[in-house]
């Protein structure tokens, strides 16, 4: 969120909704969102059932996840 935003509360609510577990699971299951970013989705049985046609995909995710990092930076 930009520090100069005049709608911080609205932006924060927008970000919370579109990164929530519920929304991202919905996107992965009903809209076939590619590469869902939450680990919990890769434990969801409905998602795993959909992935049966992509052998190795969930397993590869679990193998690469421990070495994956998100870096945040400040543009001071």
Image (spheres, helix red, strand yellow):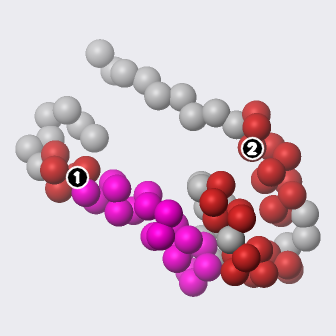
Q: Residue drawn at (44%, 58%), measured in percent from left and top?
A: 19
State the separation of the CA atoms marked 2 and 1: 29 Å
Is residue 17 highlighted in magenta? yes
Residue closest to the far left? 6
| Quarter-of-image position of residue 10 | bottom left
In the depicted structure, whether residue 43 falls above or below residue 9: below
Q: Residue drawn at (47%, 70%), measured in percent from left and top?
A: 22
Q: Which residue is mark 2?
A: 65
| Magenta region, residue range | 13-31
Residue 47, position in %: x, y? 70, 75
Q: Residues within 10 Å of mark 1 (few under 14, many from 20)?
A: some
Is residue 75 highlighted in magenta? no
Secondary structure of the residue carrying numbered label 2: helix
Q: Is residue 64 left or right of 16 when viewed as pictured?
A: right
- Majority secondary structure in the magenta region: helix
- Number of residue marks: 2
| Quarter-of-image position of residue 30 | bottom right
Q: Quadrant of the N terminus?
A: top left
> Does the CB distance between marks 2 and 1 fall below 8 Å?
no
- Front one among 4 and 22: 22
Q: Residues within 10 Å of mark 2 (few under 14, many from 20)?
A: few
In the depicted structure, whether residue 60 falls above or below residue 74: below
Residue 15, position in %: x, y? 33, 54
Q: Which residue is mark 1?
A: 11
Q: Is residue 67 left or right of 16 when viewed as pictured?
A: right
Q: Earlier in the sequence, mark 2 or mark 1?
A: 1
Residue 37, position in %: x, y? 59, 55
């Amino acid at each position: 969120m930009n520090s100069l935003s005049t709608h911080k509360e609205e932006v924060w609510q927008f970000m919370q909704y579109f990164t929530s577990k519920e929304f991202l699971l919905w996107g992965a299951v009903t809209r076939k969102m590619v590469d869902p970013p939450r680990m919990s989705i890769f434990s969801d049985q409905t998602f795993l059932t959909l992935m049966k046609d992509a052998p190795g995909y969930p397993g590869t995710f679990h193998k690469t996840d421990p070495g994956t990092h998100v870096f945040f930076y400040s543009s001071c």
